[in-house]
Image (cartoon, coloured by chain):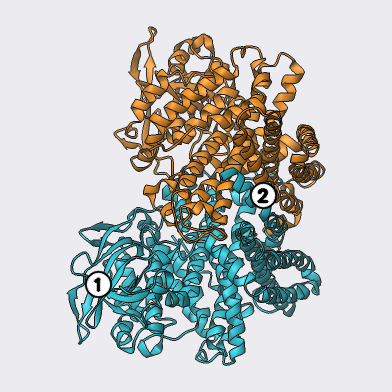
Chain colours: A cyan, B orange
Amino acid sequence: MTVYVAPVKDMMFVLEEVAGLDEVAALPGCEDVGADLVSAVLDEAGRLAEEVIAPLNKTSDQQGATFADHAVKTSPGFKDAYKQFAEGGWIGLTCDPEYGGQGLPYLLSIPVSEIWNSACTSFALCPMLTSGAIEAITHHASDELKAIYLPKMISGEWTGTMNLTEPNAGSDLAAVRTKAVPNGDHYLISGTKIFITYGEHDYTDNIIHLVLARLPDAPPGVKGISLFVVPKFLVNADGSLGARNDAKCVSIEHKMGIHGSPTAVMAFGEGAGAVGYLVGEANRGLEYMFTMMNHARLAVGLEGVGIAERSYQQALGYATERIQGRVVGREGALPIAYHPDVRRMLMSMRSQTEAMRALSLVAAAAMDKAERCADAEERKRQQARIDLLIPVVKAWCTEQANEIAYTGVQVHGGMGFIEETGAAQHQRDARITTIYEGTTGIQANDLMGRKVARDGGEAAFALIAEMGQTVAAAQADAALKTLGDTLAEAVGHLKEATAWIVANYGSNTPAALMGANHYLKLMGTVAGGWVLVRSALAAQTKLAAGQGDAGFYKQKIATTGFYADQVLPLTASLLTILRRGESSLKAADAALG
Amino acid sequence: MTVYVAPVKDMMFVLEEVAGLDEVAALPGCEDVGADLVSAVLDEAGRLAEEVIAPLNKTSDQQGATFADHAVKTSPGFKDAYKQFAEGGWIGLTCDPEYGGQGLPYLLSIPVSEIWNSACTSFALCPMLTSGAIEAITHHASDELKAIYLPKMISGEWTGTMNLTEPNAGSDLAAVRTKAVPNGDHYLISGTKIFITYGEHDYTDNIIHLVLARLPDAPPGVKGISLFVVPKFLVNADGSLGARNDAKCVSIEHKMGIHGSPTAVMAFGEGAGAVGYLVGEANRGLEYMFTMMNHARLAVGLEGVGIAERSYQQALGYATERIQGRVVGREGALPIAYHPDVRRMLMSMRSQTEAMRALSLVAAAAMDKAERCADAEERKRQQARIDLLIPVVKAWCTEQANEIAYTGVQVHGGMGFIEETGAAQHQRDARITTIYEGTTGIQANDLMGRKVARDGGEAAFALIAEMGQTVAAAQADAALKTLGDTLAEAVGHLKEATAWIVANYGSNTPAALMGANHYLKLMGTVAGGWVLVRSALAAQTKLAAGQGDAGFYKQKIATTGFYADQVLPLTASLLTILRRGESSLKAADAALG
C-alpha cells in the first residue's frame, strides 16, 4: 500500500513557473541547478521517502523513542533509514563543498525538506537539527573546529543538536543560566538544557551539541551569552573518538506527537564539567543564533507544509473509498468525497497546502538571492523580503497545517479518532510546529514590530506592490478576471492593515499587538492567494499555448478559484478585528485584571 | 492543588438573568426549581466534581480503560467515583419520579452536565449514555420493560448503552444489518456494533444495551429498523440476575482522547443469539432515536462547553504564574498573561466559553418549555426554536471547544506539548466531540436543510427578530451602544445569509451545502454574541441599580466587549463565503473530478 506520494509534479510546476528556478540557476554557484537536475533530485528524494521513510511514520508514533540508562533507543527502522539517508548525501545538500557538502541552493533543498516532513516529521528532525548545527559551525567557528566537525556532520557520520532552552529560559533566552568556565584551551560547561531534539539517540557514534552558556564575567541578558561546541565524545587529534564527555541525556519527554523524535533533557557538567569549545567570539552566541533563525524558521514552516500534504493525501484516500449515505443531487452509492461538505473540507486542505508550498518556495528563492546575488543592493532587497516573509511562512504554514490536519481527522469521521487510522497522528504531530522555533505569537510580534513597523512598512509595501502586478495581470485575462478581482480586494485589505500598523504601532504598541496574530494571518492568507494566482496565470498561459498537461493546469486554476472563494474573503474580517486592538485590550484588562 | 473550580457564579447569573430560570420555575412540575434549589444543586455538583472527579482526569488519560477476556477494567478511581455519583442521585436528575427520578428540568441538569464534563469527560460519558438509554425506555418501552429496567438504571445500579453504529453503518443508519429473529416472547439478536461507549466496564453487575436491528421481514432502509433492550445478564422475574446473555465486548478502541471511556466493539449473538426485547413497535427504531436526538446532541454540545472551561482555567493558571520575557509597555518581571497576544488568547477562550455556556442554557430552557408549557402553540413555538438551536449548540460549541483547547496548549508554549502538563489532553479529548452524535457536517446540513430551508426560514427569522430586540435594547443604553451596533451588524449578516438560503437552497442544493458549515458557524457566532449582549444588558442593569457584585458585572460587560471586537466581525467574511457556494462547488468538481 502506498502511504504517501511525493507531489513532485506540483513542486516542479511551482519551482519553474512561480518561484523562478531559472533566476536561481543564474546565481553564482548555481550553474548546474537546471530543471533536469532538480527534477531528478526530487524524484530520488520521493523514492526514498515513499519506500523507506513514510512506512515508518505510524510505527514511530506507536513505538516511539525510549530511554534507559542515559541512552535512547530510536523507533524501529529509524536507524537503518538514517543510514540510507546519510549515504544518499541528503544531509549536505546546501552545505559547503569544501567540507563535503553539495553547495546547492535552498530552492532545491526546501521542496526536499517538505518531502522528508511528509514522510515522517519525527525522522526528518534529526537531519534538520544537524543542519542547524552545521550552519552554526560553518558561519561562526574557527577553521580548526570546522575541520574537526564539519566533514563528519555533513556526511552524517555524526549528528548535531541545538541546546538553547532551559526550564526558565524558553522564549526568553536572556534568562540562560548554563555556565562556561575557561579551562586551558577549552571551557567547562555546566547546566541543564531542555527540549533538545535528538539530544541522544543510537544512530551514530558521536553527537555534536551546540550549547548556549554564560562566561563568568559575561554581562547580564542577551549580550552575555556565548556559543559552544560540546561533543558527546571528545575527538582526538587524529579524528578518532576519545573520552566520553560530561554531557548526558537524563530523560526524554512524553509528548503529544512526534513520538519518534527523542526530546531530551540534557545535563552538562554533572561531574567535572563538560568540555566545550567556544564558537567564534565570546558573548556573541545569541547574535549567531539570530543569523540562523531564518533558516530554522523556514524549516519549521516546511514541517507544516509536509504534514498538511500527508494529511490531505490520507483524507482524500479515505474519502474516495468510504461509501456512506446518499449524495444530494447524485444517484447511486458514492464515496463520501462527493458530499458537498466533504468536498469543501478536501478542497480547503488542498488549496491551502498548495498555497503554503508555493509561498515556501518563493521564500526559498528569496533566501538564495539574498545570499548569492552579485549585486549588493539586490541582496539587501531580497534580505528585506525574506525577513518579512519568514515569520509568515513559519507561523501561517504551521497554523494552517494544524487546521488542515484537524480537518483531515474530521473527513475520517469516527475512524479519525481511532489511532490505528493514522489521521490523528498528523494532528498530534503538527501541534508542536506552532510552538518551537518561536511561537506563533512571537512570529506575529516579530512581523508587526520588527518587520513592518520598524521600516515604516517599506518591505511590506514593496511586497504589496508586487501583488498588485499579479492582480493586474489576472484582471487583464478574461478567464482569470474574477480571481484577479478577489485577490485585489484581499490585497487592498492587507494594504490598509499595513498602513494602520505604520500609523498606530508606535503610539500604542500593546493595542497594536492585540492584532499581531490577525495581521500575520491576513498576510499569510493574502500571500497564499498571491502565489496561487501567479500559479493560475502560468497555468492559463500554458493552456492557451496548448503546452503540457491540460488536466493539471485546469486543476491548478480550479484550486486557486476555490481558495479565492473560500479562504481569501477572511481578510475583510481580519482587518476589522485588527483595527479594534485598543478596545480589545481595554476589555481584556478589565476582564483579566 | 485545585485543578478545577465549577463556575457556579457565572452559571447562576446566566440562569437567572438570561436563560429565564423564573419562567422555567413557573412551568408545570417545576414549582420547586427556584434559585435557592438550583444554586444548592450546582454547589453540590461542584463539590463532587472538584474533589472527587476532576482529580481523576489526568490519571484516566494516562491509565485508560483496559481490556482482557471480554472484560474492561476502568481507570483507577473511576469505580469508586461512580459509586459516589450514583449514590448522589445524579443519574436520575431529569428522570421520571415514578421510577425514582427527580423530574427536574433541563435548565438544571444542563449546567450540572457542564460541570461533569469539565471535571472528566471520560467519566461523564457513562451516565450520559445511561440517560439516553433511560430516555428510550421511558418514552417508548412497555410498562413491563420499564418496571424491570428503569428503577435500577435511574438509581445507577445498572448502566445503559446505545448500540447504533456498525462498520458500514456510521452516519447512515439505513445501512444497519444487525438481525433480530422472533423467538417466543423475545428476539434473538446477532450482529456487530462498534463505537459503543461504556459497552463494557466494571462499575455494575449489569449493563443494559439498547440495540438497533432488523426483523427478518423488515422493509429496507430506515423504515425497517427496530429497537431492542439487550441486557448483559438476563433478569429473572424477581428482579435478580439470571443467565449471561450472548452479548460480548470483543475489543476496545485505542483512541486519540477520552482514554478513560471504554469504546467497545460489541458482538451480539456469536453463539445462540442474544436475547432482546422489542422496545415499542417494530420498525420504528430510528424514529425513536430521532425523538432522543435533541437531548443527545445538546449533551455533546455540553462536552464542548465543559472541556473549553477546563482548558481555559488551566491556561489562565499557567499564564498567571509563568514569567518569561519583558512585557511591552510595562515594567518588571510579569507573568505571560500580560503579553498582549497571550491576553488575546486567554480572552478569546473565555469570551467564547461564556457565550457557549449561555447559549446552551438558553437552549435548555427552550427544551423545558417545549415539553412542559401548558399552551400547545407555545410548545410548538419552543420546539421550533430548539430544533433550530440544537445543531448550532452541538456543532458550534464543539468546534469552538476544539479551537479553545488548541489555544490552551498554545498558551503553555513548549510545556503544552508535554503530556504531563495536561493541556494537550483537553485538545485530544475535545477532538471526538465534533464527530459523534452527528459530525459537524451533518449538523450543518441539518441546520441549513431541515431547520432553515424547509420552513422558509420561519424559525430562523423568529430568532433573528428576537436578536433585534436585544440589539435595540443595547443601542438604547449609552454604555452599551457600541456593543449594540456591533451586534446589529452581525445580526444583519445572519439575516442576509438566512434569506440567501431560503432563496437558493431549493434551486441548487449542493451549492448551498458548500456553505452549510459557514452558515452554522455564522449562526453560532451571532447567537453567542446575542446571549452575551443579553448578559451585558443584565449586568448593566445591576450596576445601575447598585446591586450585587459590581466587579463580576464589569467583567461580564468587558468579556462581551472582547467578543464583539474579536469574534463577531467574522460574520462578514462568512456571509461572503456562503454566497460563493456555486463557484466553490464548480471549482471543487473541476479539481477533484
Q: Amino acid at mark 1?
A: Lys
- Quarter of the image with the N terminus of chain A in it: bottom left
**Residue that label 1 marks:** A232
Q: Nearer the viewer, residue A377 or B364?
A: A377
The quadrant of the image that shows the C terminus of chain A is: top right
Residue A443's image quarter?
Answer: bottom right
In the foreground, A497 or B162: A497
Above or below residue A433? Residue B76 is: above
Residue A139 in the image, given as x and y percentages of width and height? 41, 83
Res B539 quadrant in image: top right
- The vertical placement of B243 against B295, above or below, is above
Q: Report the label total.
A: 2
Disc 2 designates what residue? A340
> Disc 2 or disc 1, which is closer to the eye?
1
Q: Nearer the viewer, residue A510 or A65?
A: A510
- A450 versus B185 height, above or below: below
Q: Amino acid at mark 2?
A: Pro
What residue is rendered at 50% in x and 83% in y? A105
* Residue A11 position in % (x across, y down): 56, 73
Query: Does residue A564 appear to the left or right of A19 in the view shown?
Result: right
User: What x and y, as percent, mark residue B311?
Assistant: 49, 43
Residue that appears at 52% across and 9% down: B98
- Disc nearer the start of the sequence (2/1): 1
Please state the horizontal and vertical placement of residue B557, each as a whole percent of the image.
66, 39
Query: Label 1 lies in what chain?
Result: A
- The circle drawn on residue A331 is none
Answer yes or no: is residue B262 visible.
no
Which chain is home to disc 2? A
Circles 2 and 1 on the same subunit: yes
